[in-house]
Structures are given as C-alpha cells and as structure tokens.
Image (tube, rainbow, N blue to C red):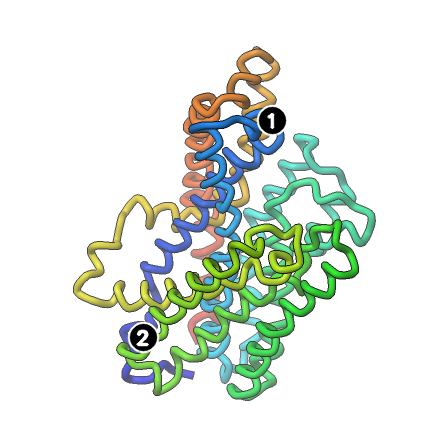
C-alpha cells in the first residue's frame, strides 16, 4: 500500500529523525544499566544527595525499551503494509529480518557462553526466541537485554501473518484490541501473582508494538495530513503527560501496586507515540536541522549492537577491575563519581565495539540483504 500523496514527505525509505529516537532509546538503556542497574545492587542506592538524585532520574532509563517497541511496531507494520501485495511477501520479510538481527545476536550468544555468563539451557531459550518466558521452563533469565529480542522475534513471527491475511480495517481493529487487552491482562496477572514481576512476557508488553502499528496504519491513510498529524502528536503527548501526573499519587510509576502494574507504561506509550509523530513533522520541515544531531544519529546507527553488548561490557569491566583491585572495584560501585568514571570507560568501550560491529560485521549482512535478487523485485 503506497503512502497517500498528502504525506509522502512524512513516509520515506530513510527517516533519519527515527534514527535519532533510536539513539535516544539506546542511550537511556545504557545509562540505566550503568547507573541504576549497578547501584540497585550496591550501597549507593541507599545514599542521599547527588547520588540519590542521579540514580532516581536514571531509573527511568528502562523506558528506552518501550520507545524501541513503539518504533518497531511503526517500522515493521509499515514495511508489511507497503509490501503486502508482493508474491515474495513472507520470504522477503523474514530473510531481511534474519540478516539484520541474527548475525550479531548469535555472535553475542557465543560470547555469553564462552565467558560463562549464560549456561546452555538459557542459550537454548534464546535460540528458540523464548528467553523472555524462560522462567516458565525453569530457566533463569541470565542476560537481561535479550528478553526484548524474544518479544521482537515473536512479533516478527505473528504480525506478518495478521497483516497479510486481514484487511486494513481488521488489522486496525486487532491493534486496538491488543492496546485494550494488554493492560487487562496485566491487571489479571497482578491480582493472581502480586509478588511476581511478569513484565517480560510478550502478552504484557504487546501494547507498545500495537501503538506503533496504529501509527503506521494511520500515516498511510488520506486523512493523515501534516496538520492532523501534528495535532494528534501534540494531543498524544498532552494525554500522556496528564495521565502520568494524575497517576503519580496512585503509584503509577511502580509495578508493586495495582495501578502501576496495570497502567505504568500507558502514559509512556501515549508520549512516545506523540513524540514519534512530532519528530516526523519536524524532520520534514524547515526546522529539521535543529534536531539532526550527528552524534545522536550515530547512536541510532549503532543502537542494535550497543543494546546487545553494553551490559556484557559492564560485566567484564567489573570482573577485570575486581581481579586487579577489589578495593577500586568497590569504589567504582559505591560512589557516584566512581559510577560516572566506570560509565565513561566501560560505556566508551561498548560504543567502540558496537561501532566496529556495525561497520565491519553487521554491514556485510546488510549489504547481502540488499543484493539478494528478491529484495529488488
């Protein structure tokens, strides 16, 4: 389905403003791992003053994952809609996804196994793309970032079937159903298992993907004029902010109560959806140079590799420092200045590895993806 004439500038083969959002998302995740993830396992989390402020602010970095879900829902649904009539619809989609995702993914799995961070049972769940529900098979989630890859792969498996088989109207209804049903499932889960955090399960986070899917569908309708897209974007941001403010006194920020467990990611789905629409507007306007930050676009360029590798680098950095100087390792984990130094060094190494991977490893498979004859039909 080609985009309508009144929004061809919004939908383009390359949308650099979305790369910027990928960059924001991955930076949020890296900061979360570097500070809150570490501090939550050390005495720093009990500190007051600057340390407590920094950790509290960065605690929300996990929401970068939610932004990734909205972006993925938007981009994947757009690809599927635009290629729905192709005779090689499934072949093209799955081969291109495999060449983009699997090489770096399997390379990471090998590293996790060699370094002893993950054991074979967990690696097997990763190969089968069920690591996000590994606990259902009695297997501990041994490398946290991989749960989102499982969610994405399950989305890649099921959503193309729906888009191909259903009409546009039915696909829209299905996306809305997912948005409504997912919080209800979170509510039921909390009432039955209040002491368990089940956020990793696909059926409890699918609404983020569905929000992105709805955006992709709407942008391909004749009603999606720039003015309407702008108004909807502003409205979504406003609704998200209002929902967050209203929910704060009721504990919406914490999944340890019924409101938070059910609605914690609701305002963020609104906010991120609105921000995506507004970024598309700004990125195709005369103000686009204001947001086109090269360094942020670069983080979007290496976001996949950086997401995969960053926590592993922090783990190995800690092991090396602890081997040579346990006292120094303690200092790096128990003071805010120590955590900042650790972030600059280990985070810098992670960025370097991700950059090299993108340029010399992942790029090979991306070029192969574009060279395949069926990709040009």
Residue at point 45%, 41% (across, down): 57
Answer with mark 1 or mark 2, whichever residue precedes in sequence.
1
Work out whether residue 366 or residue 2 is closer to the camera in this orientation and state it. Answer: 2
Residue 316 lies, with reference to residue 17, above or below; the image says above
Residue 262 vs 170, above or below: the answer is above
Q: Which one is nearer the viewer's eye here, 132 or 239?
A: 239
Query: Relative to 333, is 222 on the left or the right?
Result: left
Q: Residue at x 34, y 73 (%)?
A: 11
Pointer 2: what residue? 231
Q: Position of residue 26 (x, y in %)?
A: 45, 47
Please tell me how crowded label 1 is: few (under 14), some (14-19), or many (20+) other residues with Cα within 10 Å: some
State which quarter of the image contains the N terminus: bottom left
Residue at horizontal 51 percent and vertical 42 percent from the top = 59
| Location of residue 213 with respect to 27 vertically, above or below | below
Give left or right: position of 117 versus 37: right
x 46%, y 42%: residue: 357
Q: In terms of secondary structure, where does tag 1 sit?
A: loop
**Disc 1: which residue:** 42
């Amino acid at each position: 389905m080609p985009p309508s004439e009144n929004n061809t500038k919004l939908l383009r083969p390359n949308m650099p403003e979305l790369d910027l959002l990928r960059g924001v998302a991955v930076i949020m995740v890296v900061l979360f791992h570097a500070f809150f993830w570490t501090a939550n396992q050390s005495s720093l989390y009990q500190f007051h003053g600057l340390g407590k402020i920094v950790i509290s602010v960065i605690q929300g970095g996990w929401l970068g994952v939610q932004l990734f879900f909205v972006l993925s829902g938007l981009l994947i649904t757009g690809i599927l809609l635009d290629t729905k009539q192709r005779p090689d619809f499934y072949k093209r989609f799955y081969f291109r996804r495999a060449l983009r995702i699997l090489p770096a993914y399997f390379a990471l799995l090998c590293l996790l196994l060699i370094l002893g961070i993950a054991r074979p049972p967990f690696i097997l769940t990763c190969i089968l793309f069920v690591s996000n529900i590994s606990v259902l098979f009695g297997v501990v989630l041994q490398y946290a970032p991989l749960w989102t890859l499982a969610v994405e792969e399950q989305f890649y498996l099921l959503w193309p079937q729906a888009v191909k088989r259903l009409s546009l109207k039915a696909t829209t209804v299905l996306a809305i159903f997912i948005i409504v049903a997912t919080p209800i499932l979170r509510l039921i889960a909390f009432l039955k298992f209040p002491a368990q955090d089940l956020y990793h399960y696909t059926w409890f986070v699918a609404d983020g993907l569905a929000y992105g899917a709805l955006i992709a569908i709407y942008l391909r309708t004749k009603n999606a004029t720039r003015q309407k897209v702008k108004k909807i974007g502003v409205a979504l941001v406003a609704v998200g902010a209002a929902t967050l403010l209203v929910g704060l006194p009721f504990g919406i920020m914490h999944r340890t109560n019924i409101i938070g467990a059910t609605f914690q990611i609701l305002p963020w789905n609104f906010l991120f959806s609105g921000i995506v629409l507004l970024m598309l507007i700004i990125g195709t306007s005369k103000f686009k140079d204001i947001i086109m930050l090269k360094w942020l676009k670069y983080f979007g360029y290496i976001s996949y590799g950086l997401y995969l590798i960053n926590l592993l680098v922090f783990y190995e950095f800690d092991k090396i420092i602890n081997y040579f100087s346990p006292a120094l390792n303690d200092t790096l984990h128990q003071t805010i200045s120590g955590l900042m130094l650790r972030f600059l060094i280990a985070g810098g190494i992670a960025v370097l590895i991700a950059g090299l991977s993108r340029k010399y490893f992942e790029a090979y498979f991306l070029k192969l993806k574009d060279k395949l004859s069926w990709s040009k039909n």
